[in-house]
Image (cartoon, grey):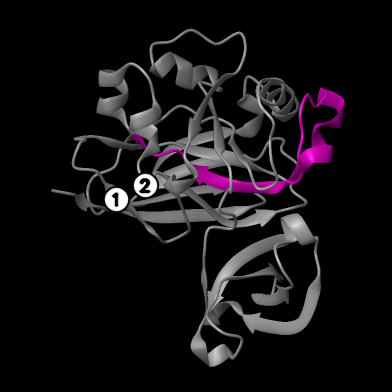
Amino acid sequence: MRIVRFTPNESVGIGTDPHFGVLNDKDVILVLKGDPIYSGIVPTETTVPLADVKILAPIIPRSKVVCIGKNYADHAAEMNSVVPTEPIIFLKPNTSVIGPNDTIQWPRMSDRVDFEGELAIVIGRICKDVPKERYSDVIFGYTIANDVTARDLQSKDGQWTRAKGFDTFCPIGPWVETEFVPGEQIVKTTVNGEVKQLEPLSSMIFKIPEIIAFVTQVMTLLPGDVILTGTPAGIGPMAAGSVVEVSIEGIGALSNKVSSKNV
């Protein structure tokens, strides 16, 4: 089930406030009542063509975005790092989240802005100390993310908060797929159509059960929290005006443009 968040055109006749819906394979959205993470899947009788809406980030985390660093061995190698023995976690603020086709704003502090395509987990319930065998109980679904990073600032600071925390530095979308099961699906990132990252999810060092168990030992997760599961090798810079697209088989594709450097 593909859960979308959208604003309809005025001509649709249901107002222009954001709504949630279920997108079918005929590009028609069944409008839902309320937020499905909190209210469950409660359908209305209203349907809207996908062509008549703007797709938004499928979830705006009320609390936090938790990220897993260096979770692919090849990526750890390209960062001149050893393979971690336990998950490396860091946070991005919820104010960094944008949706599909929104613009990544190049901050004036940075001279290099990189892409990092990733699978993202959307949490569906309050959870703490989740055992690995019960990880699926707390997952609402999966989506796609781009952990945008000001690489020069990451190197300069020696820690990652500023480099990864700018507004617009966490594109997610285009929807949440509630029936997705991670396995051999390929994560692919392209910049202006050129393939930069191409690796199966099975290459992750720490798999989803381990990630959920580890993170919830550290902190309580809340409904709507998002976990970014790490990026494969192939990260690199995005020039001003570039279009970066991250796709994962079984979910879809997330596309964003990069602005000129802000001055």
Judge from the rendering whether residue 34 lies leftward or rightward of residue 42; answer left or right: left
- Identify the residue position indicated by label 1 in the image: 105
Please name which of the two marks, 1 or 2, marks the residue nearer to the observer. 2
Name the spot of residue 190 as percent of width and height, x first.
41, 46
Magenta residues, start to end: 124-149
Residue for point 48% across, 7% down: 82
Measure how far apart labels 1 and 2 are at the Cα level.
8 Å
Looking at this view, is 4 or 124 the one in front? 124
Tell me the tag on residue 167: 2
Q: Quadrant of residue 211?
A: top right
Tell me if residue 31 can be seen.
yes
Q: Is residue 219 above or below residue 17?
A: above
Residue for point 44% across, 47% down: 95
Helix, strand or loop under label 2: loop
Residue for point 59% across, 32% down: 229
Tags 1 and 2 in contact by the CB under 8 Å rule?
Answer: yes
